[in-house]
Image: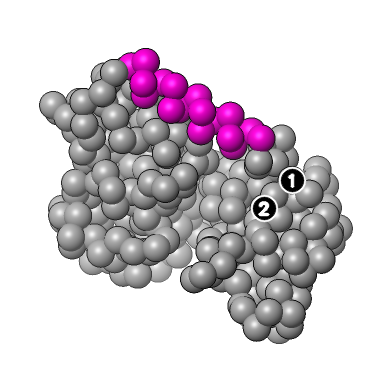
């Protein structure tokens, strides 16, 4: 244990804000992953700045996460600091806009929009992530994307400076943005919506939720859609046509319900999930000549030939 570093973190976030050797299986939607050396939960932007400054001063690696919905953490865990943003979840309404801190879940933000009769965010209500991650990867579902509703985002850049980027400056594309490419950290974003009625907004949210329950394996731990959509194709159909529906390795399995989802049937390891992802990529490429790209990010895996 690095007692000096631990004490410095305590001085920033307090006793309840830092844990050592914290299992990442408790903080990812795959429910797998080894321990993080330090697991830190800040509540303010000032605390984030202090943590990053400390990490750089002590040459300690750090990783920001939301609710771990798009991560596969290795069974060996994560060295250094994991900084979880979920307590930074405040939101204020400014006319037709919602200004929210990055740790708020998309489900919570969609309910806030509903309560204020603001329309246009219904697509995001069932995406299992936080606002920060959604901006970083331009998350989308059912015909909507973050680029359709975002006005601006405030980020911490790789030099530790805070800057506000307009929608255009964010360079939002399919599952990409300048945030991810430049390793920025989203601190806050402004979502611009239109006036609607609570009845119509709720009806659309309920319709999308029903479609998700019908088509997605929500009863299992997963990271949502495992693969990006190849241009001109659907990942799930390619996987199904490759004969991989229900195929598994260890406790990881291609969902019978939706082949675009790799699920943890209950006792999977991160290694099982990683091996299955690569096997799916290899078999689809062998059969169709298309290499599926993952939406899931891999954390803590050693470089090796898989």
Say if the magenta span includes residue 211: yes
Q: Is residue 203 visible?
A: yes
Q: Quadrant of the C terminus?
A: bottom right
Q: Which residue is at the front of the view, 283 or 203? A: 203
Please state the total of marks drawn on the protein image: 2
Q: Give the percent coordinates (x, y) of residue 220.
A: 72, 40
The x, y position of residue 57, in whole percent, is 32, 64
Instruction: Please indicate whether residue 137 sits to the left or right of residue 187 in the image.
Output: right
Contact check, label 2 and label 1, Cβ < 8 Å: yes
Distance between the alpha carbons at the discs numbered 2 and 1: 8 Å
Residue 261, label in figure: 2
Element under label 1? loop
Which marked residue is nearer to the observer: mark 2 or mark 1? 1
Identified at 78% across, 49% down, the residue is 256
Left or right, 239 with reference to 166: right
Write the residue at 69% across / 49% down: 258
Secondary element at tag 2: loop
Viewed as shown, does residue 73 lie left or right of 272? left
Q: Residues within 10 Å of mark 1 (few under 14, many from 20)?
A: some
Residue 7 included in the magenta stretch of the image: no
Q: Which residue is mark 1?
A: 257
Task: Name which residue lies at 30% across and 61% down.
Answer: 172
Q: Position of residue 60 (x, y in %)?
A: 44, 64
**Residue 144 in picture, x, y percent from top left:** 38, 46
Magenta: main secondary structure equals helix
The answer to whether one can see residue 85 in this image is no
Q: Which residues are magenta?
A: 198-214
């Amino acid at each position: 244990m690095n007692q000096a570093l631990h004490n410095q973190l305590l001085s920033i976030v307090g006793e309840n804000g830092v844990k050592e050797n914290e299992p990442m299986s408790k903080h990812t939607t795959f429910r797998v992953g080894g321990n993080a050396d330090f697991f830190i939960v800040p509540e303010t932007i000032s605390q984030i700045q202090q943590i990053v400054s400390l990490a750089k001063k002590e040459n300690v690696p750090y990783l920001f996460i939301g609710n771990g919905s798009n991560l596969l953490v290795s069974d060996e865990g994560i060295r250094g600091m994991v900084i979880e943003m979920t307590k930074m979840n405040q939101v204020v309404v400014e006319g037709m806009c919602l200004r929210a801190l990055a740790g708020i879940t998309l489900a919570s933000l969609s309910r806030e929009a509903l309560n204020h009769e603001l329309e246009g965010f219904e697509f995001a209500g069932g995406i299992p992530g936080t606002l920060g991650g959604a901006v970083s990867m331009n998350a989308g579902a059912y015909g909507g994307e973050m680029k359709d509703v975002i006005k601006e985002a405030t980020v911490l850049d790789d030099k530790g400076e805070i800057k506000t980027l307009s929608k255009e400056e964010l360079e939002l594309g399919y599952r990409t943005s300048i945030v991810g490419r430049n390793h920025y950290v989203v601190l806050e974003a402004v979502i611009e919506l239109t006036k609607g009625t609570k009845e119509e907004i709720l009806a659309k949210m309920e319709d999308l939720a029903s479609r998700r329950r019908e088509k997605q394996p929500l009863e299992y731990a997963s990271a949502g859609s495992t693969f990006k959509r190849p241009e001109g194709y659907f990942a799930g159909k390619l996987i199904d046509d490759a004969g991989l529906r229900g195929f598994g390795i260890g406790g990881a399995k291609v969902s019978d319900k939706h082949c675009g989802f790799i699920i943890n049937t209950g006792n999977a390891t991160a290694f099982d999930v990683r091996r299955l992802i690569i096997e799916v990529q290899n078999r689809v490429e062998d059969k169709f000549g298309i290499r599926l790209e993952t939406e899931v990010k891999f954390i803590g895996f050693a470089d090796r030939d898989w």
